Image: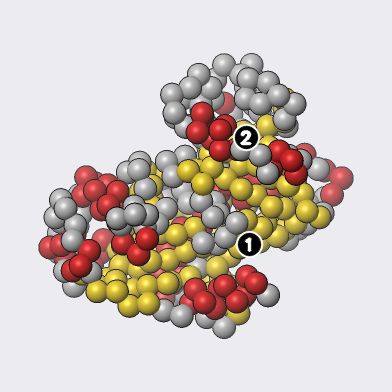
Amino acid sequence: MIQLQKVHGSQNKFFLLDQTQFQTPLSRGELVNLAQQITKPESGLLNGADGLLVVSNSDHAQTLGKMEVVNADGSFASMCGNGLRTVGRYLAQKYHKEAFKVETIQSDLRVSCQPDWAPKVKAVSVEISPVSFAAAALPFTNLGYSELINQEVPELAPKLKFSAVAVPNPHLISFVSDDIFKSDLLAKLGAKLNQKNPFFPDGVNVSFAQVLSAHHLFVRTFERGVGFTNACGTGMSAASLVYALTYPQEHLFGQLLTISNPGGFVQTKVHRTAHSYWIELIGNATITHCIDVAESELHKKQLDFSNFKITSTTENEAYQNKYKS
């Protein structure tokens, strides 16, 4: 039998699958097929999810495993901060380690277990890097800039200032007023930039942010390959970095920030080294369900969810109580 988990970080929901359990691991095509079927809100399992987290072995030094992220549409993401926290928790419990690295597509990232935020609310810290502002890293084009940091871009939206940063997922960030935040501009801009367009040929995650207080932001993200989610870990990390850079009077580097989102909140710290930046993302890593299924079922082209045995946990209730407190 294979056991999957349904997990979330700030209500950014995923199914987690450990490929090391298999006698014959799923092929790339089978992983895409699984992700596309299991995550559908209407016909998927447990009302679907935002993506599939795939854990496998890594041969990199000091790493406990490798993480791949398959979006709901079957595309592969460079990174996922909320997902990495749940993978970090899974590997920590599997190997009885508190601090280690996880291999991702672009780099090996630091993970550490943190004190529980509340009973049954596990917390994990993960590194978000590498960071690049270069147009080629996102990529973007036809906007008149080689880097985009707090610049007005009338081609995207009049009077708004935008910053573009890869962490390594590509993100477009704008700090906006309350009326813009409550409008449908984010939905329209996110949809526009994630179909064929002259500016972001590979698409981009688009986030609007608001400053609630000196150390508290609210961020909402339209994710590439997904659409609106309850939270985007790399989006909140990117917004924290842009905030620290564009509000230097607040002296925010190395300071603990709270980033609220539709699914809850996380904490971040933006770190500046001699030649680069990285962000520490701290938040919940919650298991909502454990799912047992025969390996043969997951190799089938058409999945039959009636053959999946589901056991729920009480962790999401504990998280909701913490979020509301």
The x and y percentages for residue 252 are: 78, 51
Above or below, 63 against 198 in this view is below
**Which quadrant, please, contains the N terminus?**
bottom left
Left-right relation of 247 to 20: right
The numbered mark at residue 19 is: none
- Is residue 197 in view from this perspective? yes
Q: Residue furthest bottom?
A: 119
Left-right relation of 124 to 63: right
The x and y percentages for residue 266 are: 63, 61
The numbered mark at residue 185 is: 2
Q: Residue at x 15, y 56 (%)?
A: 299
**Which quadrant, please, contains the C terminus?**
bottom right
User: In terms of depth relative to the viewer, which is nearer, 294 or 131?
Assistant: 294
Q: Residue at x 50, y 19 (%)?
A: 198
Q: Residues within 10 Å of mark 2 (few under 14, many from 20)?
A: few
- Judged by depth in the image, the label closer to the viewer, 2 or 1, is 2
User: In terms of depth relative to the viewer, which is nearer, 99 or 21?
Assistant: 21
| Amino acid type shown at disc 2 | Leu
Real-space Cα distance between discs 2 and 1? Answer: 23 Å
At mark 2, the secondary structure is helix
The x and y percentages for residue 269 are: 68, 56
Q: Residue at x 30, y 57 (%)?
A: 44
At mark 1, the secondary structure is strand
Q: Residue at x 57, y 72 (%)?
A: 320
Above or below, 10 against 106 in this view is below
Q: Residues within 10 Å of mark 1 (few under 14, many from 20)?
A: many
The x and y percentages for residue 215 are: 78, 57
The numbered mark at residue 265 is: 1
User: In terms of depth relative to the viewer, which is nearer, 208 or 20?
Assistant: 208
Label pair 2/1, CB-CB below 8 angstroms: no
- Is residue 68 in view from this perspective? no
| Amino acid type shown at disc 1 | Phe
